Image (spheres, grey):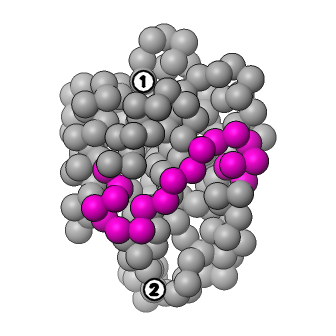
Amino acid sequence: MQPWADEVHRALVAADVRFVGYVPDAGHKRLIELCHADKSMRAVVLTTEEEGIGLAAGAWLGGARSVLLMQSSGVGNTVNVLGLLKTCGFPLTMVVTMRGEPGEFNSWQVPMGQGTQAALETMGVKVSRASTAAEVAPLVAAALQSGEARAVLISQKVIGIKSFQEQTNQ
């Protein structure tokens, strides 16, 4: 269960977020379900994370707020297009579930997990990290209120470490 997801959804509603872009991710499962069920939001499944930057740009140009949900491995897919945030100066909140932290079973997740924060900061995104479930919603709410490009990284301690067995049973 992801109790922080309900609190984050309330923060999205309070910030009048209308578009939620995401690539399916077990770490965001509950939040994605809440966004799909919310008639005031349009949850948009993406083929790849960089499409979310375009979705956010379009929403902003149309006067709507958006948020992008992704896993840390997806941050690598966004690096080139993150330049759009700085060039055009539009706000975007990204909520990133972390992989590749201590206990990770999948070695392919480790390099981008270790480089996520640096990659985002290099592209001008301000980063905060939630190490407990109680920290997630307040950090997301603050990011939404900032009017800047912000990312909230949710530690694997919060979302749980996946095991190989869990992966083969899904």
Q: Is residue 129 magenta?
A: yes
Crowd rating for badge 1 (residues with CA inside 10 Å; few <14, some 14–19, many 20+): many
Q: CA distance from mark 1 to mark 2?
A: 35 Å
Q: Position of residue 19 (x, y in %)?
A: 40, 29
Image: 18 above or below 139: above
Q: Which mark is residue 163?
A: 2
Image: 106 above or below 89: below
User: Which stretch appears magenta?
Assistant: 119-137
Q: Which residue is mark 1?
A: 65
Q: Position of residue 151 (x, y in %)?
A: 53, 47
Write the residue at 45% across / 73% down: 156
Q: Quadrant of the N terminus?
A: bottom left
Write the residue at 65% across / 22% down: 89
Question: Disc 2 on helix, strand or loop?
Answer: loop
Q: Is residue 98 left or right of residue 109?
A: left
Residue 23 visible to the viewer: no
Q: Quadrant of the C terminus?
A: bottom left
